[in-house]
Structure formats: C-alpha cells, structure tokens
Amino acid sequence: MSSIKPLADRVLLKVLEQESKTSSGIYIPETATEKTQKAEVVEVGESEDIKVKKGDIVIYDKYAGIQIKEGDTEYLIVKNEEIVALIKK
C-alpha cells in the first residue's frame, strides 16, 4: 500500500511487470523491451471526472505521468485524460 495520495484529476498507478521470457522459454533482456503501458489503479484524486477506481487495470499514454519509486515498487501519477483504456477482467 502506498502513502501517496493524488490530488484533483490525478490517478496513482502501479506499473505492472512485463514478462521477461516468451511462452517458449526464451528470456528477453530488459534493454530489448519497450516500457509497459499497463498498470493497476492504486489511488484516485477527488475529481468527479475520474472514471476508474482502485484495483482497475488500465492502459496509459506512453509518455504519461510522473514516475515515483517507493521501496521496490514503481508508481506513476498521471492525469485522468492520460488513461486511454480500461482492461475488463
């Protein structure tokens, strides 16, 4: 759990880890993969315009947000409009 609380129309995302090997067992070096754009919603600001909630898995703009590292966990604080899709479970 994070101690970070986003304000206004901002959303705190936990970046999801990307698979480091293929289904056939080949390992992919970190330098050969693009930054993942999938994340889990951790906290949301107070704005009524925010359509996502805690626990949702979302896709965000490639260059969105402010990166923050807390312990071993990588977070992003993004504007609501930088979230482009919700992944249905």
Image (spheres, helix red, strand yellow):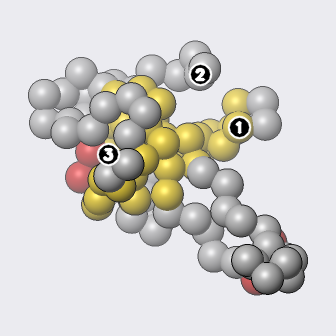
Label 2 secondary element: loop
Q: Position of residue 10 (x, y in %)?
A: 33, 36
Q: Where is residue 59 in the image (x, y as percent from the top left)?
A: 40, 59
Instruction: Name the mark on residue 60.
Output: none
Can residue 66 be spotted in the picture?
no
**Residue located 13% across and 28% down the image:** 48
Residue of label 2? 2
> Which mark sits nearer the N-terminus, 2 or 3?
2
Q: How crowded is mark 1: few (under 14 residues within 10 Å), some or many (20 or more)?
A: few
The total number of labels drawn is: 3
Whether 57 is drawn above or below 30: the answer is above
Q: Do the residues labelled 1 and 2 touch (CB within 8 Å)?
A: yes
- Left or right: 65, with 80 as reference point: right
C-alpha span from label 2 to label 3: 18 Å
**Residue located 75% across and 78% down the image:** 22
Label 3 secondary element: strand
Instruction: Report the front residue among 22 and 49.
Output: 22
Kindly report which numbered mark, 3 or 1, lies closer to the viewer in this rendering.
Answer: 1
Residue of label 1? 73
**Residue located 67% across and 62% down the image:** 18
* Residue lying farthest to the left in this orientation: 48
Kindly report which numbered mark, 2 or 3, lies closer to the viewer in this rendering.
Answer: 2
* Residue lying farthest to the front in this orientation: 24
Callout 3 amino acid: Lys
> Which mark sits nearer the N-terminus, 1 or 2?
2
Instruction: Identify the image quadrant of the N terminus.
Output: top right
**Residue located 49% across and 57% down the image:** 38
- Left or right: 18, with 53 as reference point: right
**Residue 28: quadrant of the picture:** bottom right
